[in-house]
Image (cartoon, rainbow, N blue to C red):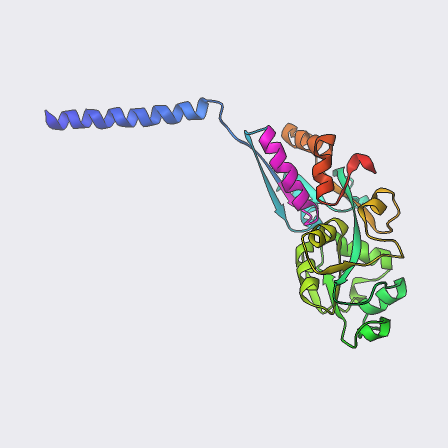
Amino acid sequence: MMVRNRVLRCLAGLFTIVFVMGLSACGGSQTEKLVLTGSSTVAPLASEIARAFEQLHPETRIDVQTGGSSRGINDARNDLADIGMVSRALKSNESDLTAQTIAWDGITLILNSSNPVQLLNRSQVIDIYTKKITNWSEVGGPDQPVVVVNKAEGRSTLELFLKFYQLKGTEIKADIIIGDNQQGLKTVSGNPFAIGYVSIGAANYEKEQGAPIRILPVNGVDGTLSNVEKGLFPISRPLNLVTRDQSNPLAQQFIAFAQSSEVAELVARQFFVPAHAN
């Protein structure tokens, strides 16, 4: 009799667990998820916007992964991500995708703040990156070798840098290859003789946080948010969210939020120009 009672109690407990699980599954608490992949320039901004979006929509979870603009293009094309992050305009062979701009940025040269060089002209930059100039003393700096920091393949920052200076990738003679902006900023911050190029937004943000870097003018134009907003900075670019189609309502809702005036202050805090301001 005692054994029979124990069996009945176990069955009752099991029924309760299954019933509760069933209620949970049917209770409307399902979480909707978005996956964004791509540009390391866009990713920090997208993460901040995602946090604000999740606070307004607690039932959503947004996963932001970096890897470069090329990854953003490929993942959006192959349905590996709901939204691709791309820090440049789409190319003619990417017309299968739709780009929606959430902010504007530029690409600027950076030195360590201990380096006394204040300005490099166009030909000097080209000669440094092709190793025709190898010592800082040749451009008014200390008698020390120049350490050239370059971006890895697949990064839109590299593509735009090469296009602006009319260089081929094979002409660059780099000492250090880096991936995202943070790597470039840490490398130049830690090496008094290094030169690199990164996002204006990332550079200004890190400089305000105390990073020992100097932001050089490009073609005589200071790398500031104001000059990007006015269209004066020569290497400016859109920060885009791209999709293969518009059939995902949550993705479209997130993109609309990222373009709205609701996040303009958040965009400015990241040292980018809000989409509607340019």
- 56 to the left or right of 203: left
Residue 112 in the image: x percent, y percent? 73, 64
Nearer to me, 227 or 3: 227
Q: Is residue 268 visible?
A: yes
Dividing the picture into quadrants, the one containing residue 26 is top left
Q: Is residue 161 magenta?
A: no
Q: Main secondary structure of the magenta part?
A: helix
Q: Which residues are magenta?
A: 36-56
Q: Is residue 52 magenta?
A: yes
Residue 220 in the image: x percent, y percent? 89, 57
Answer above or below: position of 82 versus 139: above
Dividing the picture into quadrants, the one containing residue 115 is bottom right
- 220 to the left or right of 257: right
Q: Which of the image's four quarters has the N terminus?
A: top left
Q: Is residue 243 visible?
A: no
- Residue ranking furthest to the left: 1
Residue 202 in the image: x percent, y percent? 71, 51
- Residue ranking furthest to the bottom: 143
Residue at 84% in and 42% down: 229
Dividing the picture into quadrants, the one containing residue 80 is top right
Residue 175 in the image: x percent, y percent? 72, 69
Residue at 67% in and 57% down: 179
Residue at 65% in and 51% down: 67
Residue at 81% in and 57% down: 161
Nearer to me, 217 or 90: 217
Q: Which of the image's four quarters has the C terminus?
A: top right
